[in-house]
Every structure is written in C-alpha cells, then in structure tokens.
Amino acid sequence: MLEGLDASGKTTQLRLLGEALAARGIPHLATREPGGTQLGARLREVLLDPARAMRPLTELLLMVADRHEHVEGVIRPALAAGQWVLCSRYTLSSLAYQGFGRGLDLDVVRRLNELATGGLEPDYVFLLDLPPRVAYERTRDRDRFEEEGLEFFTQVRVGYLELLRGVPRGYVIDGTLPPHKVCGEILARLPLSGL
Ligand code: TYD
C-alpha cells in the first residue's frame, strides 16, 4: 500500500514496483483509490471536482463507498487469485485527509473504514513523505483537495506521520529521493528473497 500527499510520486512508484514484480515473475495488480472500479471512477470525478463543494462527512461517506466497491470487487478477488495487490491510497488516506485534514472524528473514520473493508488490512504500508510545501508546489490544475492549500497539506502530513507509528510494517520513505531510489527503498523492505 502506498500513501502520501498529492504529487508524492505514488503513481510512478506503482509503475516501477509493478515492473520490479513482473521481472521476478510475481503476479500482481496495481490499483488505486478513489477510482479503482467503474463506479469508483464516477465517485472520483465528483470527489475531485473543484466546482462541487461538499460537507466533510459526505466526502468521507463517498470515499468509503468507493473503498467498499474496490475491496469487494477488485482487491479481494485479486488476493484470492494469488496476486500481490499494489494500491495507491487506502484507509490511511481517509484518516489523514478526512480525519486530520477535515477535522472529522478519527473513531468515526476508523469505524467506517472497518465497515468498508471488512477489516482487510495491508501487509505493508509505505508513506512517501514530502514536505507539504514541496507537495503543494508540485500540484498543477488543482483538484478540490489540492486547492485547499498549504495549511491543509501540513495537517494531513502531520496526521500521516502520527498514524504510521501505529501501523505494523508501516515505513516512511523519503519522497524527495529520485524515483528509482524510492523504489529501491521499498523493494528492500518487501519479502522478495526466496520467491
Ligand atoms: P489521488 O488520485 O491519489 O491524488 P494524487 O495522485 O494527487 O496523490 O487522490 C485524490 C485525492 O483524494 C487526494 O487529494 C487525496 C484524496 N483522498 C482523500 O481525501 N481520502 C481518501 O480516503 C482517499 C482515498 C483519497
């Protein structure tokens, strides 16, 4: 599972990791939230549209609706078929963005995450960490989250770092490193030897 602020390089890492697993003959699936299903793609449009204001709880409910479809329709079937699932964003995004960023009660976010996922947790979480200013400056054509500004990004990052301390096999990776180095840091922590 990859997590991190907007523009922290998750999409690039998903591709590089996919290539690294393919080179080792490991069956895998790369996917993302929000938007990893057909319905999710529609939810994603609504969620990111800067012209569409919504209340924080509505935002959370749409995120977890997307997650439920994704877990049941994509992630569980892939795991059942023996694939490794590489996913950009999951439950920690809701805790960091809707909890720390929007100020929703973390227990409410946790309970809805649990409901949406049926308790399915990732084996590994990699936080691609960036200073908020760098992340903010990297974003262009800002979507509804990216236009929230530096203060919002700062709260989300504080949240991520705090949350990650409670995650088993959760690692903070320096997102300012060149992409191939970031990928190397991730691969070094995955159980690849002997496969
Ligand atoms: P994403 O497409 O991963 O954006 P980026 O590629 O720029 O990192 O995610 C879109 C936005 O959705 C992002 O700003 C974070 C937000 N988001 C939440 O606020 N809560 C969530 O639970 C998820 C999955 C995403």
Image: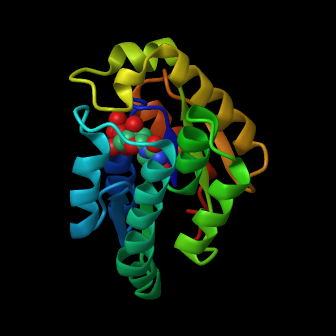
Residue sticking out furthest to the bottom? 80
Q: Position of residue 126 (x, y in %)?
A: 57, 45
Left or right, 174 with respect to 40, comes to right
Residue drawn at point x = 24 percent, y = 68 percent? 39
Which one is nearer the viewer's eye here, 52 or 67?
52
Q: Is residue 10 visible?
A: no
Quadrant housing residue 75? bottom left
Q: Check the image and report above or below for 188 versus 132.
A: below
Which one is nearer the viewer's eye here, 6 or 175?
6
Q: Position of residue 114 (x, y in %)?
A: 63, 69
Which one is nearer the viewer's eye here, 68 or 80?
68
Q: Check the image and report above or below for 125 versus 80.
A: above
Residue drawn at point x = 36 percent, y = 54 percent? 34
Left or right, 180 with respect to 108, comes to left
Residue drawn at point x = 35 percent, y = 79 percent? 73
Residue drawn at point x = 69 percent, y = 47 percent? 105
Quadrant housing residue 77? bottom left
Residue sticking out furthest to the right? 166
Q: Check the image and report above or below for 90 versus 7.
A: below
Q: Is residue 67 visible?
A: yes
Q: Quadrant holding ligand 1? A: top left
Q: Check the image and report above or below for 156 versus 24.
A: above
